[in-house]
Amino acid sequence: MRAGGDVTDRARLTPREARALFRAGLVTPTSGWAAGWTQANLIALPRDRAYDFLLFAQRNPRSCPVLDVTEPGETAASIFDGDLRTDLPAYRVYRNGEQVAEVADVSSYWRDDLVCFLIGCSFTFEAALLEAGVPVRHIEAGTNVPMYLTDRPCRPAGELSGPLVVSMRPVPAELVPAAVRITSRYPAVHGAPVYVGDPAALGIADLDRPDFGDVVEVRAGELPVFWACGVTPQAAVMRSRPPFAIGHAPGHMAITDARDTAYLVP
């Protein structure tokens, strides 16, 4: 079941209402959903790989800001009063670093030794950008945010290594300072951009060929602005090839019960 309906209506949903729709089979990117509530990336790894990932996240806090961690086998978290197996719109399943499935329910793949990490997501600060008059093109277009693998390596940890992944939003040049200022106040959900301008400086050859998500238009007078992205853990899974992992499908996030303001700093 694919998304439809009015964007405003989606924004007004509570996390519980949004999760119920996803549990019923709705598959949609979640940018613009449940305004005011924090969204999170998901990566779930077996217990024997969990410490490596926790260390990887500690060493790469811009791309992997940890909001919550479960005990092995738990299917809810302190900021997510739902079922992490069913209440996201879509998931990706990896074996030995290869994606073997993209599904709306991972119950049949679940293991009792999985530790779930909820990682901050830049969708969280998009409402603040919109309130300040900074456009968010993928919300305007009703598409997923474009995401790109870069040539910037993350600091490795244990058996995990991989490249930084970034999300991109085109911003009018005169509004870039506002976008930087606004997002810098949300360090737990990636914070300020990692780069503004020529994508080649990040090793991105073509903005019209994102590695994840959808293409968006960069209009005259706009600059591409890049933020660290919580798909970085999945890039590390694909590079490092652990035996098993589950992640969210890029752009299809966990809508948590935490308020955006909980991660806003003065």
Image (tube, helix red, strand yellow):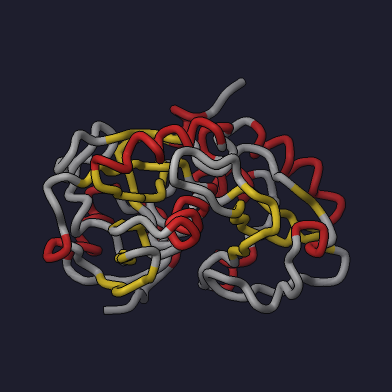
Question: Image point 62% across, 72% down: which residue?
Answer: 210
Q: Residue sitting at 64 percent across and 65 percent down?
A: 137
Q: Is residue 220 left or right of residue 255?
A: right
Question: In the image shown, does 167 or 112 lie closer to the viewer?
Answer: 112
Report whether 5 appears left or right of 184.
Answer: left
Residue 111 is situated, as x and y percent measured from the top left of the image, at 14, 53
| For residue 41, above or below residue 3 | above
Residue 145 in the image: state x and y as whole percent.
Answer: 56, 64
Up-down: is 243 above or below 189? below
Residue 73 position, x and y percent, is: 14, 43
Towards the viewer: 126 or 133: 126
Identify the residue shown where x is 51% and y is 68%: 144
In this picture, is 106 found above or below 219?
above
Residue 32 visible, this orientation? no
* Total numbered badges shown on the rendered structure: 0
Q: Quadrant of the C terminus?
A: top right
Residue 50 visible to the viewer: yes
Residue extending farthest top: 266
Q: Position of residue 82 (x, y in %)?
A: 18, 46
Residue name at image x 60 percent, y 54 percent: 163
Task: Name the foreground residue: 102 vs 122.
Answer: 102
